[in-house]
């Protein structure tokens, strides 16, 4: 087993575990933190597959901007089930373990010999070729994703509309 294969299995396991912990947490702040670990794991997987630009995008856009925005929204809406501000150490232990594992993986990736062969070869394609390939060969997947985004948008509008009505009724 090569170093890249070993790192892949470790990071993939941690990514799946942190995603599972993100969807099982009642406290939304904890869920956001575990989701950030999940995004960092996905970025490491992109890097291991030879796509450092996608890894950088994953960290900058998803783990950085979107999760910070989500965290601000969670803190601003003041949900009643938000929980205490003092976090017991038992709730931060898995996050600390995930962070330590990512630190070790990062050190191993940096210390790997530069001549080590990357498992997948990169292919250069223009945006037009990529779009043609995606929309000709995977058109159903694109349609399903667009339908899911539409349903999420309609659901968010529906929830926001009902939330606004309740607040107006309570004020009057």
Image (cartoon, rainbow, N blue to C red):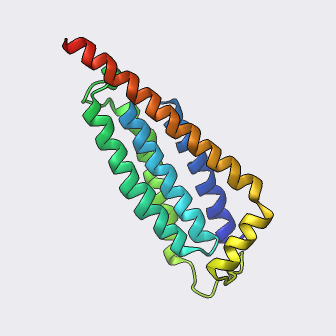
Residue lying at the far bottom of the rendered structure: 115
The residue lying at 37 percent from left, 57 percent from top is 64
Q: Is residue 44 above or below residue 157?
A: below
Q: Position of residue 35 (x, y in %)?
A: 47, 45
The residue lying at 62 percent from left, 42 percent from top is 148
Between 134 and 61, which is closer to the camera in this rendering?
Answer: 134
* Count of numbered tags: 0
Q: Could you tell me which quadrant the N terminus lies in?
A: bottom right
Q: Position of residue 5 (x, y in %)?
A: 69, 66
Q: Position of residue 151 (x, y in %)?
A: 58, 37
Residue 8: image quadrant is: bottom right
Q: Could you tell me which quadrant the C terminus lies in?
A: top left
Q: Position of residue 81 (x, y in %)?
A: 35, 21
Is 97 positioned to the left or the right of 16 in the image?
left
Residue 168: image quadrant is: top left
Q: Is residue 75 above or below residue 159?
A: below
The residue lying at 51 percent from left, 35 percent from top is 154
The residue lying at 53 percent from left, 74 percent from top is 52
Is 168 positioned to the left or the right of 15 in the image?
left
Between 5 and 53, which is closer to the camera in this rendering?
Answer: 53
Between 104 and 58, which is closer to the camera in this rendering?
Answer: 58
Residue lying at the far right of the rendered structure: 137
Is 10 positioned to the left or the right of 108 in the image?
right
Residue lying at the far left of the rendered structure: 172
């Amino acid at each position: 087993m090569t170093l890249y294969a070993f790192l892949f299995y470790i990071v993939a396991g941690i990514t799946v575990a942190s995603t599972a912990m993100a969807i099982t947490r009642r406290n939304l702040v904890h869920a956001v933190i575990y989701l950030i670990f999940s995004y960092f794991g996905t970025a490491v997987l992109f890097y291991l597959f030879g796509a450092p630009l996608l890894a950088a995008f994953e960290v900058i856009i998803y783990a950085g901007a979107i999760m910070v925005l989500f965290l601000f929204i969670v803190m601003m809406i003041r949900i009643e089930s938000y929980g205490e501000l003092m976090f017991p150490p038992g709730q931060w232990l898995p996050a600390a373990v995930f962070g330590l594992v990512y630190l070790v993986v990062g050190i191993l990736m940096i210390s790997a010999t530069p001549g080590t062969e990357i498992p997948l070869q990169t292919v250069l394609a223009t945006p037009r070729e990529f779009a043609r390939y995606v929309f000709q060969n995977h058109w159903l997947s694109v349609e399903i994703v667009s339908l899911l985004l539409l349903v999420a948008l309609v659901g968010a509008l529906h929830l926001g509309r009902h939330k606004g009505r309740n607040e107006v009724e309570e004020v009057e």
